[in-house]
Amino acid sequence: LAGARAAAGTSTTLLPINLGGLGFLTVADSARIEPALKSALGGKWPIVPRRLLSALVRRRGRTLSRGVAMNDVVIKGAGGLAAVHHKMAAPGNELGHLLADGLIAATAAGSTAYSLSAGGPLLAPDVEAMVGTPVCPHSLGSRALVLAPGAELELTVLGSFDRVTLLFDGQESVDLLPRDEVRVRLDRTAVRMFQNPGQPFVRSLQKKLGWQGSKKRSL
């Protein structure tokens, strides 16, 4: 993910290989590296853009931090034992308050990761949209929200009994204080990635996420 962020906005094209576990949006497993390289470098695989998220943190009217993420930007309690109280707006209109263990802002690529585990929707990887997914909200009315490419998700941290942190792809972090403002949106820059035509999104849903169906109807 760090490599993807570094390649954003450049002519570099990434070939995502699964060297670990799920690897949902990778184009090949480690045993197929050589054929994947031949297909990609031989011009047989298309190149597609994947837009990143950008996040801005403001404190007392001044910009404290900026960053980008390939999958998601997450606000949560660092200890994981206390809820965080936010005030939300999107896009430019108040959505009220959110009391939850955290909030995930995810790209389409990130919609198959932490956001999905928290109950967020699946987006096809070529959809240019941002998902805002509450983590264990303390309200039945708090649900995931899909926002258009130009929309901005604004959050004001009101407080928590825990230390609150902002995470970029689960790697880089920024500590947040009460009244800090976080603004997240799809970034203008994108990462160029090879796409394996023989491994479409719907096949990955079946193979890696266990999407099931049957020709027999259940009556």
Image: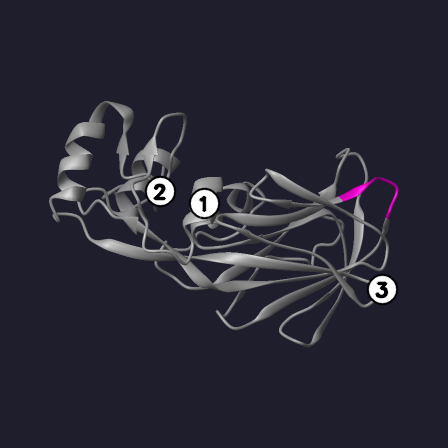
The CA distance from mark 3 to mark 2 is 39 Å
Total numbered labels placed on residues in the image: 3
Which of the labelled discs sits on residue 60, or is there none? Answer: 3
Answer few, some or many: residues within 10 Å of disc 2's Cα (few below 14, many 20 plus, some between 14 and 19). Answer: some
Point out residue 54 in the picture as x, y percentages from the top left corner: 56, 59
Q: Are marks 1 and 3 in contact (CB under 8 Å)?
A: no
Q: Which residue matches tag 1? A: 112
User: Does dot 3 land on a helix, a strand or a loop?
Assistant: loop
Q: Is residue 167 left or right of residue 163?
A: left
| Circle nearer the N terminus (2, 1) | 2
Point out residue 91 in the picture as x, y percentages from the top left corner: 62, 74
User: Does dot 2 land on a helix, a strand or a loop?
Assistant: loop
Question: Which label sits in the foreground, 2 or 1?
Answer: 2
Quadrant hosting residue 96: bottom right
Magenta span includes 157: no
Q: Which residues are magenta?
A: 160-164
